[in-house]
């Protein structure tokens, strides 16, 4: 059979048309499926806004503008909204807390102000996790970005607050042991890396503690602490654990619970704690056992915390560090955390 050029041309056109038709049909199907999957998130967000409006003084027009903004955003935004909403609603008095923190932002709902910071924090977190997976060390610029993430974004603090709402057994054990370590100690207390001070009541309402100061790198966490827990015998200070803005001999008790493993130079914290402690003062340090014993292997495999120091000392190196900074090791408790009770001695009796 012989085909004319006209027939071949028509067949090519037919094939091209059919190919374009299939491509457009696939694109249309993808769009429809995307809208279909997006619909539950839109409805849930709208329902949340309705419930949110009933609990606050935010007017409906502002929430409507917010919803319209969200509808124009990528599908991932709805997943983040869903995650963020779940965290806030599962934190005790989470909505009221966000409203009070951002009450001055009268142009958009306080919830959205916090969500925007949360969204920024998610992208920063993903960046640091990718660096961790590649085994790349953080540059000076990265260190500044990490500081900004911990200081300004609510992600890390909200995650902690969520875990404290229903604390696991290890958290309770750590708390009980630290309280036992400071039993009988009197005077001024500094909690380094206090976050929102989940153990505030246990410390402040103790008759032995004359003054409680909580310090943390997170501005967001300290705002929460000041808002809900500031009293006449307490205060909060934003500072880095490796450079504390307190005078020599300012405290009788210093606590650093789950802080040392986040630091680039843990020895700086020990030197600072020794400096600000009075003679015979106590320094309580707790560190997760997996960070010390397994050298952060779980963190490397993304089961842990990307803010941990990947080159953290092992147990013997930690002991040597405490001794080299002139602390006396009075007690070591284990499982699931290493908890060290250290004492400052300058009389040579080590």
Image (cartoon, rainbow, N blue to C red):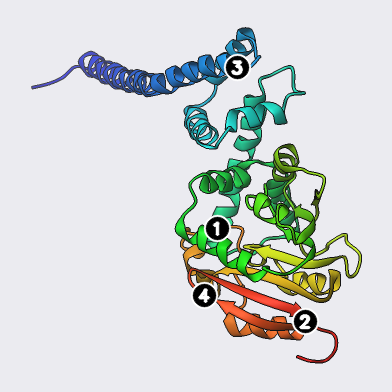
* Residue found at x 88% / y 70%: 249
* Residue found at x 22% / y 19%: 8
Q: Name the residue nearer the viewer: 216 or 130.
A: 216
Image quadrant holding the N terminus, namely top left
Residue receiving disc 4: 334
Which-is-in-front pick, marks 2 and 4?
4
Residue receiving disc 3: 66
Residue receiving disc 2: 325
Disc 3 residue crowd, few under 14, some 14–19, many 20+, Cα 10 Å = some
Query: N-terminal of the two: label 2 or label 4?
Result: 2
Name the image quarter holding residue 244.
Answer: bottom right
Disc 2 residue crowd, few under 14, some 14–19, many 20+, Cα 10 Å = some
Q: Are the residues at dot 2 and dot 4 in contact (C-beta closer than 8 Å)?
A: no
Viewer can see residue 57: yes
Q: Are the residues at dot 2 and dot 1 in contact (C-beta closer than 8 Å)?
A: no
Viewer can see residue 309: no
Q: Name the residue nearer the viewer: 206 or 250.
A: 206
* Residue found at x 52% / y 71%: 289
As helix, strand or loop, the secondary structure at mark 2 comes to loop
The outermost residue toward the bottom is 349
Q: x, y percentage for residue 200? A: 68, 51
Marks 3/4: CA distance? Answer: 49 Å
**Relative to 73, does residue 61 appear above or below in the rendering?**
above
Query: N-terminal of the two: label 3 or label 4?
Result: 3
Which-is-in-front pick, marks 3 and 4?
4
Image quadrant holding the C terminus, namely bottom right
As helix, strand or loop, the secondary structure at mark 3 comes to helix
Residue receiving disc 1: 305
């Amino acid at each position: 059979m012989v085909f004319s050029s006209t027939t071949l041309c028509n067949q090519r056109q037919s094939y091209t048309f059919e190919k374009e038709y299939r491509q457009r049909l696939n694109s249309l199907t993808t769009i429809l499926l995307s809208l279909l999957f997006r619909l539950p998130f839109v409805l849930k967000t709208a329902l949340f806004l309705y419930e949110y409006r009933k609990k606050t003084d935010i007017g409906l027009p502002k929430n409507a503008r917010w919803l319209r903004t969200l509808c124009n955003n990528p599908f991932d935004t709805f997943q983040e909204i869903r995650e963020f909403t779940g965290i806030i609603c599962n934190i005790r008095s989470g909505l009221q807390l966000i409203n009070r923190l951002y009450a001055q932002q009268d142009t958009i709902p306080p919830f959205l102000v916090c969500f925007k910071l949360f969204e920024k924090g998610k992208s920063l977190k993903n960046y640091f996790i990718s660096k961790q997976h590649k085994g790349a060390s953080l540059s000076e610029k990265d260190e500044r970005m990490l500081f900004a993430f911990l200081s300004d974004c609510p992600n890390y603090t909200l995650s902690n607050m969520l875990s404290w709402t229903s604390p696991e057994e290890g958290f309770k054990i750590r708390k009980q042991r630290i309280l036992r370590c400071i039993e009988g100690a009197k005077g001024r207390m500094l909690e380094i890396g206090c976050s929102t001070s989940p153990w505030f009541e246990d410390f402040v309402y103790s008759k032995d503690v004359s003054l409680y100061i909580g310090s943390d790198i997170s501005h967001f966490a300290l705002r929460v602490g000041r808002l809900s827990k500031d009293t006449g015998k307490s205060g909060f200070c934003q500072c880095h654990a490796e450079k504390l803005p307190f005078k020599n001999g300012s405290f009788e008790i210093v606590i650093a619970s789950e802080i040392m493993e986040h630091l680039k130079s843990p020895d700086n914290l020990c030197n600072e704690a020794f400096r600000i402690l009075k003679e015979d003062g106590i320094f309580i340090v707790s560190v997760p056992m997996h960070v010390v014993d397994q050298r952060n292997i779980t963190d490397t495999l993304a089961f842990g915390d990307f803010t941990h120091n990947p080159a953290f000392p092992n147990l013997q190196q930690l002991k040597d560090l405490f001794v080299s900074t002139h602390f006396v090791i009075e007690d070591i408790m284990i499982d699931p955390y290493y908890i060290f009770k250290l004492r400052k001695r300058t009389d040579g009796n080590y």
